[in-house]
């Protein structure tokens, strides 16, 4: 898919469009990931060479907390980037960050609540947990673009939009994870091989792997923002005028 149009998209078109956006705006999206997730990623890399999380429990917990906030910021900012691309405008890093920060309250509440409900459903049975996880796959997009009055409203909106399309959400997750795992394995094998030959490259190899991990956040954000728009077009006749008003 060479251009983005507000129309129903197949799973393949969503993935193709996400990779196209990532390629065309790589610097912006990678910069967004570095700003939002750079600190926890660096902490995780330090823990890896300092004996593992078990030796630094407090630091590991801090990394998880900052990482949770950062992942929500990346997701919110990516929604802004994809939306600007749909409108035919040049996305800007500052605008994406402002949008994410402006919506951080409801996004944080919705993300936390979605995680708790999904965890409880998974504890009950694995299959219900997967269904709930897929049902909340566009909760950040709903929280950023629709100004819900509460976190619970954002969850309900995501559940409503994904009704009848949870299988498609699961397919998108499966393919996205497969792509990321394949990339990480390839990069990991190459960097570890280099480190095995030259021991001085061990730390640089870890840095390279950590840098590659950052791009997973905007990729997932792109995929499910396109999925969100796909659902709204199918169910509500969503158009560019409505999108422009949502961003405003």
Image (cartoon, rainbow, N blue to C red):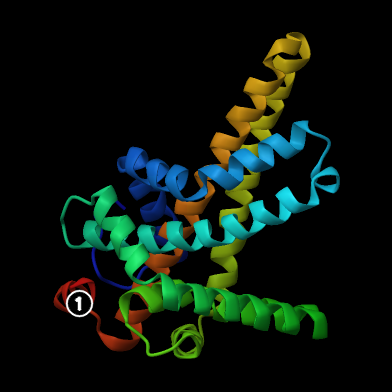
Tell whether 9 sits left or right of 168.
Answer: left
Q: Can residue 133 be seen in this view?
A: yes
Question: Please, is residue 39 above or below residue 95 in the view?
Answer: above
State the SS at label 1. loop
Q: Split into 4 quadrants, where in the image is the C terminus?
A: bottom left
Q: Position of residue 88 (x, y in %)?
A: 16, 57
The structure residue drawn at horizontal position 23% and vertical position 64%, both measured from the top left corner, is 5
Q: Position of residue 233 (x, y in %)?
A: 30, 79
Question: Please, is residue 105 above or below residue 94 in the view?
Answer: below
Q: Mark 1 points at which residue?
A: 239
Quadrant of res 234 = bottom left
Tell whether 238 sits left or right of 23.
Answer: left
Q: Residue furthest front?
A: 58
Nearest to the observer: residue 44 or residue 233: 44
Tell whether 228 sits left or right of 206.
Answer: left
Quadrant of res 130 = bottom right
What is the crowding at mark 1: few (fewer than 14 residues within 10 Å), some, or many (at least 20)? some
């Amino acid at each position: 898919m060479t251009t983005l149009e507000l129309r129903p998209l197949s799973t393949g078109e969503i993935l193709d469009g996400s990779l196209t956006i990532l390629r065309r705006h790589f610097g912006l999206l990678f910069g967004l990931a570095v700003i939002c997730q750079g600190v926890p990623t660096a902490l995780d890399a330090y823990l890896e060479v300092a004996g593992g999380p078990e030796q630094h429990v407090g630091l590991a917990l801090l990394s998880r907390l900052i990482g949770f906030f950062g992942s929500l910021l990346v997701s919110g900012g990516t929604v802004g980037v994809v939306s600007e691309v749909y409108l035919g405008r040049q996305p800007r890093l500052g605008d994406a960050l402002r949008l994410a920060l402006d919506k951080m309250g409801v996004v944080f509440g919705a993300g936390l609540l979605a995680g708790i409900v999904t965890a409880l459903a998974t504890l009950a049975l694995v299959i219900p947990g997967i269904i709930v996880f897929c049902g909340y796959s566009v909760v950040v997009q709903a929280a950023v673009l629709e100004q819900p009055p509460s976190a619970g409203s954002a969850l309900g909106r995501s559940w409503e939009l994904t009704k009848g399309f949870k299988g498609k959400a699961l397919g998108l997750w499966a393919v996205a994870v497969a792509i990321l795992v394949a990339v990480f394995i390839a990069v990991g094998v190459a960097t570890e091989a280099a480190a095995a030959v030259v021991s001085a490259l061990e730390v640089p190899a870890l840095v390279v792997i950590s840098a590659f991990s950052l791009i997973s956040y905007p990729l997932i954000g792109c995929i499910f923002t396109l999925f969100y728009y796909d659902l709204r077009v199918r169910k509500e006749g969503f158009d560019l005028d409505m999108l422009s008003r949502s961003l405003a």
